[in-house]
Image: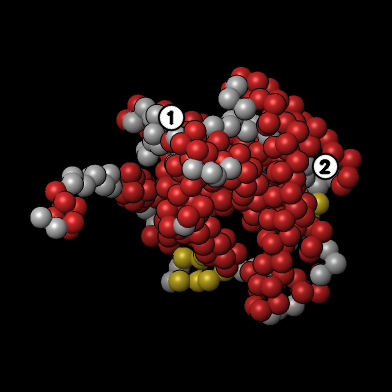
Amino acid sequence: MTASDFGAALPRPKRDLLPIFAPLIVAAIAAPFIGSASSFVTLTAAGVAMGMMIFTMASGLTLAFGMMDVLNFGHGAFISLGAYVATLVFTPLASWAQADSWPLNLALLALALAAAVVVCGLFGLVFERLVIVPVYGQHLKQILATIGGSIVAEQLLYALFGPDVIALAPPASFRGSFVIGDAAIEKYRVVATLVGLVVFVGLTLALNRTRIGLLIRAGVQDREMVEALGYRIDRLFVGVFMAGAALAGIGGVLWALYRQQVHASMGGELLVLCFIVIIIGGLGSVGGCFIGAILVALIDNYAGFLAPKLALVANILLMVAILLWRPRGLYPVGGR
């Protein structure tokens, strides 16, 4: 019997595809109530773009919990910091933002995203060393410590940048809309969608196709065994936390340009939405976070159009419905 025969004899795990179709099911249910095809296309495109931005922010939070078992209620501070970094990049390069040139505008956005990754990653390192390290493995203390760290970080942002809301418009080439028939799709939302997809693909490949990703996942399952092989899991986990903070910074840049304003409490306002997403997707699951973010954004857009008052609680109702269907989320990880 050959090695391939042994491999063929091993049972292959069945792929659970039903959650993947959940956003399509939601869209199909909403379509008849919306009525107008152009309105449906516009709302759906807006929902997907919003979902990509939420995913980028929430993916850092689900990484920290799934890989490190850390409940970080200070994640919103990284989002706000990323948004402020964008203002520091855009202000001196205002001529780039005003130029009707795709290359210049893309370069400006790339520069802002890169700066947010560096600054938020370094801030994540400091936050992890000062706030997270003393409370590893203690969830209640993690909640209290990270909430306290978030309050301190928010007040520091107010002290550095002031209490006023800062306007932040997208670059000139990203303004306006693509018109398809009677439907209008904002250019910036297309850009945000592409950035979100790049983040998702990059995360998936890094966790499943690289040596570092393999070591991180192995460390989650059996830390002692991996350390016995000579690897420093604690250093890998610090890198994971920094990556999560950097992802939050990217999301902060995208969201600030989407809302066209920056303030210190914006991250805290988005934190609840991020937690809803990772609970729906399954704590620690990047794929579940991706689907959960799209579901949350679509529901928010459809409900806002059909019943604005219901939109305030639509995501809570969605989370309840998902948990009644799958109590551990769409794609639970291990024993979470």
| Separation (CA) of disc 2 from disc 1 | 34 Å
Q: Is residue 228 visible?
A: yes
Task: Please tell me in which quadrant of the rendered image residue 142 appears.
Answer: top right
At x 51%, y 62%, the residue is 198
Q: Which residue is pictured at 14% across the width and 48% down the height?
A: 9
Q: Is residue 264 rendered to the left or right of residue 240?
A: right
Circle 1: residue type: Arg
Residue 109 image point, x, y percent: 68, 66
Neighbour tally class for label 2: few under 14, some 14-19, many 20 plus, Cα within 10 Å: some
Q: Nearer the viewer, residue 212 or 33?
A: 212
Q: Which mark is residue 7?
A: none
* Residue drawn at 56 percent across, 41 percent down: 233
Camera-side residue of 47 and 105: 105
Residue 266, visible in the rendered structure: no
Q: Quadrant of the C terminus?
A: top left
**Percent of width and height locating residue 268:** 68, 36
Q: 123 or 91: nearer the eye?
A: 123
At numbered mark 1, what does the secondary structure look like: helix, strand or loop?
Answer: loop
Q: Is residue 88 left or right of residue 14?
A: right
Contact, mark 2 vs mark 1 (Cβ under 8 Å):
no
Using the image, determine if residue 194 lies above or below residue 215: below
How busy is the neighbourhood of tag 1: few (under 14 within 10 Å), some, or many (20 plus)? Answer: few
Label 2 or label 1, whichever comes before in sequence order:
2
Mark linked to residue 336? 1
Q: Position of residue 190 (x, y in %)?
A: 53, 65
Disc 2, SS: helix
- Tag nearer the camera, 2 or 1: 1
Residue type at mark 2: give it: Leu
Residue ID for mark 2 = 157
